[in-house]
Image (cartoon, coloured by chain):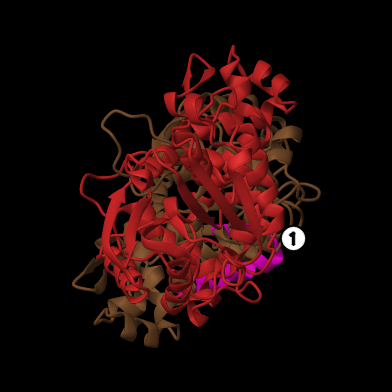
Chain colours: A brown, B red
Amino acid sequence: MSTEPRPAGAPSPALVFDTLFAYQRTAALRAAIELDLFRAIGEGPGDVASIARRSSASERGTRILCDFLTVVGLLSKADGRYANTATSALFLDPRSPACVASTARFLGHPEVRKPFESLADIVRTGRTVLPGEGSVEPENPVWVEFAHSMAPMMAPMAAPLGSIVLNGSKGPVSVLDIAAGHGLFGIEIAKQNPAARIVAVDWAAVLEVALANAQRAGVRDRYQTRPGSAFHVEYGGPYDVALLTNFLHHFDPPTCVGLLKKVHAALKRGGRVAALEFVPNEDRISPPMAASFGLTMLATTAAGDAYTLPEITAMYREAGFADVSAHPVPTGPHTIVVGHAV
Amino acid sequence: MSTEPRPAGAPSPALVFDTLFAYQRTAALRAAIELDLFRAIGEGPGDVASIARRSSASERGTRILCDFLTVVGLLSKADGRYANTATSALFLDPRSPACVASTARFLGHPEVRKPFESLADIVRTGRTVLPGEGSVEPENPVWVEFAHSMAPMMAPMAAPLGSIVLNGSKGPVSVLDIAAGHGLFGIEIAKQNPAARIVAVDWAAVLEVALANAQRAGVRDRYQTRPGSAFHVEYGGPYDVALLTNFLHHFDPPTCVGLLKKVHAALKRGGRVAALEFVPNEDRISPPMAASFGLTMLATTAAGDAYTLPEITAMYREAGFADVSAHPVPTGPHTIVVGHAV
C-alpha cells in the first residue's frame, strides 16, 4: 500500500500504519487460498456472484476480499470484474504447475506463526517461546507439513543445485541428503545422473514423503533412507556429496560445526558438502528476503540465525572443509555454499 | 521488501511470499513498540549492546529485530549502528509529540485482530465470527482502548474537521458528538470557538476518557455527556452540528439511515451533520488505505463497510439531508462528508 494523498513533502505515518496493518495481507491471502479463490477467478468470468458461487462464499465477503487483494496487487479489477494478475495466475492458481499456494500451509502453520505473537518476549530472552529446541525438536510434525507443502517453493532451485553439485559428473556418485524433507534436491541429482545413488536422512514420518516423491520421479530404486536425527543417526558412506538444505540456520555455530565434522567424516577425501541457505550480505540488511529470515529463526528456534558467507565459511573451515564457494540461486532467494573435504 | 535478484524479466513469486510473510512486519513493529526500542535507539548511541541494555532485552534478539526493522524501512543502519529514520523519529519515538505508537494497542487488540485468523469462514458467511454485532456490541471494552490509544492517529485530523464544521462561525454553536471516543473532535471545536458547547455520546466507560481529555484541554465547563447507545440514548438538542466520526462504517445502510434520521431530528433546521469516514473511490480499490478498510469491517462487524461517496450521499438524502459535500482531510486518510438538515 502506498501513501495516501498529503501535502507534498509533509512527513507521513503511512509506513507505520501499513506495517501495523500488514498482518491483514497475510490473512487475506491465506483466506483466498483456503477458498480456492484464484482458481474461481481464473476460470472466469470474474464477477462477484460467480466467484462467490464457485468459492461457496457470500457475495459480500467475496467482494470485500477481492477488493483488498486488488489493492495489494494480487488481483486486477476492471468494469467490476476481477482477474488474476500474471503473478497470481502463475503462482496462485492451482491449475498452474508453478503454483506455490500450498506453501501457505507450512508458512501459516501454528508452530511457525504462533511464536510471533510473543515476539517481544522472544527478543527479551533471545530464544523461541516454543518448548525445548523449538521447531527442531525431535519428530516435530511441522516437518511433515514442510515436506508436503514447501516443495513448490524449493522445486525451482533443485535443477541449479543439481548442476552445481554434480559439476558435469556422469559417473557413479553417492549422495547423502541430510534433512531431506520432500527429498526434491537428492531426487533431482538422481534424475540428472542415472548413476547417482541417494541416501536420505530425516525423521521417519518425513522420509515417507520423500520416498513417495522418489517413487513418482522414477528413482526409487536408487533412493535409500536412514530415519532419525541428523546429529545421531549413522550416516554410512563414505559419500561423494552431502547436501545440507535449509538446515544449518536452525542451530548456533558450535552446533553447526559439530554437525559439519560428522558430515566430513562421512565424505570421501575431496568429497563436497553443499548447503542451501538464506545468506544475507555482511551488512545483514540485504538482500531483503535473506536478511529478514533471521527473524523467523529468532522466533522459532533456540539459537538459529541466517548466517553470512564469512560465518558459514568459518564453520566449514573449522570442520575441515576448504575451497569454499558461494553460488546464488538465480531462481530463488537462496545461496548454495560448497566446500571440499580435505 | 522488494524482489530478490532473478533473471531479468523472469516471473517471480516474490509478492506472494512477501504477502505470506507480511504478518511478521506487524509482529516486529509491535514488539519494538512494546520494548520501547525506538526511544532506546533515539537516545543513542545505537549499537546493539546499548539498545539491548536500554530495552532490557537480549543482544541476539535486539540485533535480529533491528536488522528486520531496517529491511522494512523503519530503521537505518550504518557501520553496525542503528538510527531512527525520519518517519520513526517523528511517529514512533515516544519523545516526539506526533508519536502514534500507542495506536498499536487498539490496532493489535485481540477483538480487532483475532477475527482475521478466521477470515475464510468470515468470507463464507459474510459476517464477523465475533458474537452478536461484533465490535459494536454494547459496552464493548475495545472502545475504551480505542479512546485511550487512537487519539494520536486522529489528532492531526481534528483541526481540519473543526474548521470545516465551524466554517468561520464565531457565535454560539451547539455540537452533538456521537460515538465521541477520545472526544478530540468535539474538544477541538470547543477550542476553536469559545462559544461552542459540546454534548458527547458514547458508552459510559469511554466518556470518562473524553471527559479527562476535555479537562486537560481546558474546555470541561462546556463539555457534557450522555452515556449509552447512539441508537437509544436521548440526544436532547436541538443542535447546530452533529459529528459522526468513525461510526457509520460499522453498520449496514438501513441502520445508518435510521441513525441519520435520529440525528436529523436532533438538529436545528439548516443544522449540519459531519461524518469522518474512510471513503474509497467508486472503483473500491483506491485510495489504498480507505479501500483496504472494508476488510476490517468485514472481519469485525456483522454488516459494516467502507462506503463510497455516492453511497453515503444516498443515505444522507434518505434521512433528510441535502447539499452534501465531501472534504478529503489533507492530514490523514479520512474524508469528511457534510450534509445540511432540510
Which residue shows up at 76% across the image and 56% down it? A138
Whether the magenta-drawn stretch holds residue B230 is answered as no
Residue B307, located in which quarter of the rendered image?
bottom left
Which residue shows up at 48% across the image and 50% down it? B174
Query: Where does the C terminus of chain A fall, quadrant-wise?
Result: top right
Whether the magenta-drawn stretch holds residue A209 is answered as yes
Residue A73 lies left or right of residue B115; in this view the side is left
Between A156 and B131, the one lying in front of the other is: B131
Relative height, residue B106 to residue B45 (above, below):
below
For this orientation, the residue located farthest to the top is B45
Residue A337 lies left or right of residue B321; in this view the side is right
Which residue shows up at 67% across the image and 17% down it? B49
Between B139 and A330, the one lying in front of the other is: B139
Q: Residues within 10 Å of mark 1 (few under 14, many from 20)?
A: some
Residue B129 position within the rendered picture, expressed as x and y whole percent measured from the top left: 61, 74
Chain part drawn in magenta: A198-220
Task: Identify the residue position indicated by label 1 in the image.
Answer: A139
Between B103 and B236, the one lying in front of the other is: B236
Residue B26 position within the rendered picture, expressed as x and y whole percent measured from the top left: 54, 46
Helix, strand or loop for disc 1: loop
Query: Taking the image as drawn, is residue A203 in sight?
Result: yes
- Dominant secondary structure (helix, strand or loop) of the stretch shown in magenta: helix
Between A122 and B265, the one lying in front of the other is: B265
Query: Taking the image as drawn, is residue B277 in sight?
Result: no
